[in-house]
Amino acid sequence: MNRYSKVRTDLDGTLSVSALTAAVAGAVLLVPIPFIGVPLALVSLVMGIVQVRSARRNRRFAWAAVVIASATLVATLVLAATLLTVSSTTRSDPVQTAPSVSGGGQG
């Protein structure tokens, strides 16, 4: 085993763990901060797919990252569709109150 193959093997493991970490962080941050959660899920999906296609080792971490990132993106679409349908169907008209009549006279 030469020096370059050893470095390549170490980087394969690091990329898998990084993809898994980004996928979990994207899933956790989806509801409180979706502007950070969605890009993390996209990045981890790409890193996971690259890792699954190229590496022989650490494929379980890469597959886990792909699954979690995909589920996060599907959940994003479901939440967005739900919020869009709820906001477009509810319509509130302004509330009108009856004028109050004062029982007492001017003194």
Image (tube, rainbow, N blue to C red):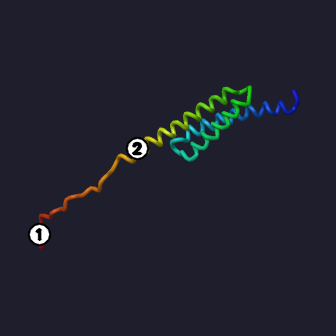
In space, the residues marked 2 and 1 are separated at their CA atoms by: 52 Å
Above or below: residue 25 compared with residue 56: below
Above or below: residue 14 compared with residue 57: below
Q: Amino acid at mark 1?
A: Gly
Percent x, y of residue 54: 73, 31
Determine which quarter of the picture holds residue 57: top right
Percent x, y of residue 69: 59, 35
Taking the view exactly as shown, the residue that stands out farthest to the right is 2
Q: Residues within 10 Å of mark 1 (few under 14, many from 20)?
A: few
Q: Amino acid at mark 2?
A: Thr
Instruction: Say left or right for 84 vs 25.
Output: left
Depth check, mark 2 against mark 1: the one in front is 2
What's the residue at 11%, 69% (across, down)?
105
What's the residue at 74%, 26% (across, down)?
56
Work out which quarter of the rendered image holds the N terminus and state it.
top right
Residue at the disc numbered 1: 105
Residue at the disc numbered 2: 85
